[in-house]
Amino acid sequence: MSKWITYFFFSVFFLLVQVSCGNVDKMPDKYFVVKVAVSGLELTDSATLLVYETDYDRLRLLNEVALVKGTASFVGQIDAPKIALLRLNHAENPLYFILESCTTEISINKQSIVITGGTLNHDYYVHYRLRNKILQAIENNKSTYAKMVADSSMTHKLERIFVKRDSLLKDSVQSMTLRLVNRNDVVGVLFKDRFINTIDSARMKELRR
């Protein structure tokens, strides 16, 4: 599975992801609608929607449509929530999300991606963003520590605080990742594919039990 999914993660072209779960427009069972709005991206004139089929370990093309005034829509049926990939022509890498039986709206410009609709989408990206916040806190802690060492303002007491904070933050992100990788749903599949290689050896043993 990784040979398919890992390739299709955000490029640095997409700078921000925000997800809203309010007022999810529920569709009849097994039906979905994906509404796409693109602005400020030169030469982007078409969008392709694919889903990952776990039973066959492959991607399946659902449709390719032209953007009309920057918008496009996809309508179809799914038997269960699936990992989906939205590919814009001339974009370096497609955007992935969870396709559900509801209306999902995706707005893309040079600064942000906003995904609205879908409880699993909301769940996945809440954890995704929290994980990134913890990783950023680790980097900030490391950077502040290095600066204080460089300007000789570091003391033994402060050093112990920085080391303890680093350990707690790393333990937090490891525990969170392990818990999400262990989920038996499509959210767990996404986390496992993207982040299983970031789990340390001690927790990998827990995963294999």
Image: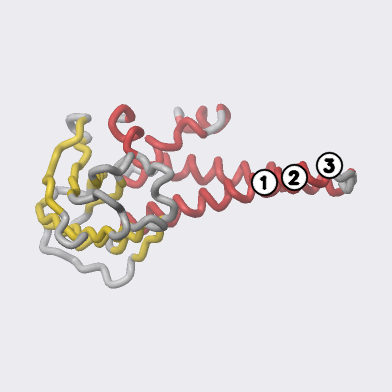
Q: Nearer the viewer, mark 1 or mark 3?
A: 3
Q: Nearer the viewer, mark 2 or mark 3?
A: 3
SS assignment at label 3: helix
- Residue 182, position in %: x, y? 41, 40
Query: In this figure, which residue is indicated by the disc labeled 1?
Result: 168
Tell me the amino acid under the disc marked 1: Leu
Q: CB atoms at circles 2 and 3 under 8 Å apart?
A: no
Q: Residue furthest front?
A: 42
Q: Residue at x 39, y 58 (%)?
A: 112
Identify which residue, 59 or 11, lies in the foreground. Answer: 11
**Are there few (<14), some (14-19), or many (20+) residues within 10 Å of tag 2?**
few
Q: Which mark is residue 184?
A: none
Give the Cα separation between the discs numbered 1 and 3: 21 Å
SS assignment at label 2: helix
Give the mark, 1 or 3, whose residue is nearer the N terminus: 3
Question: On the image, which quarter does residue 67 sit in?
Answer: bottom left
Tell me the amino acid under the disc marked 2: Lys
